[in-house]
Amino acid sequence: MIEILKYCIPALCVLLATWLVMRQFYKAEADKRLWELKRLSQKEISPLRMRAYERLALLLERTTPEHMLLELNLGEMTVLQVQQHLIRTIRMEYEHNVSQQVYVTAEVWAMIQNAKEQTVAFVNSMVQQLPPESTALDYAKVMITAYSSNGDTPNELALQALKKEAQTLL
């Protein structure tokens, strides 16, 4: 019996050592394959993410009151028409870019959604501050003045967060 143990114990030790070495080897190989797969997928995904960041930056720029008002012929519009046009523009821009949320973090997307909602609320609140006889030009002046004196606007904050996140890809 002791004679059998003399051969079995070293054999078991060799078997255990071989198993540990092979397990470590297979784990290293799996990690190496996973890293290679991630590297190849990043090669494909990174350009898509950068385009998404660009599109979302455009969304935030295009939905600022200054930008939207520059495209309108205010002399031929009423305050109500301007308000409706601005809200429609914000929603259309947002809906056009909603699919880009898959490329950004949840925090940045939440900031973009907040910027949209805050801008719509701002457009609506400016109408309520005007006297009934106001013109579209009066509305635009009040809006631009109030928006520029607000400090960091939701669009600017979202754009800063978007730029910061985009920097992680570079």
Image (cartoon, rainbow, N blue to C red):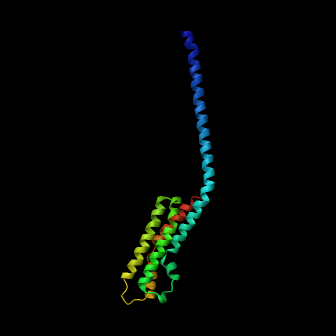
Q: Residue at x 39, y 78 (%)?
A: 124
31 w.r.t. 74: above or below: above
As drawn, 73 above or below 12: below
The residue sitting at 51% across, 59% down in the picture is 102
The x and y percentages for residue 24 are 59, 34
Name the spot of residue 45 as percent of width and height, x first. 59, 56
Quadrant occupied by the C terminus: bottom right
Is residue 15 placed above or below 58 in the rendered structure? Answer: above
Q: Position of residue 13 (x, y in %)?
A: 57, 22
User: Which residue is at the front of the view, 85 or 134?
Assistant: 85
Q: Residue at x 56, y 12 (%)?
A: 4
In this view of the protein, which residue sits in the foreground, 136 or 96? 96
Residue at x 43% of width, y 80% of height: 83
Q: Is residue 92 above or below residue 21?
A: below
Name the image quarter holding residue 10.
top right
Looking at the picture, how far across and down is residue 9, in whole percent? 56, 17
The total of numbered circles placed on residues is: 0
- The answer to which quarter of the image holds residue 133 is bottom left
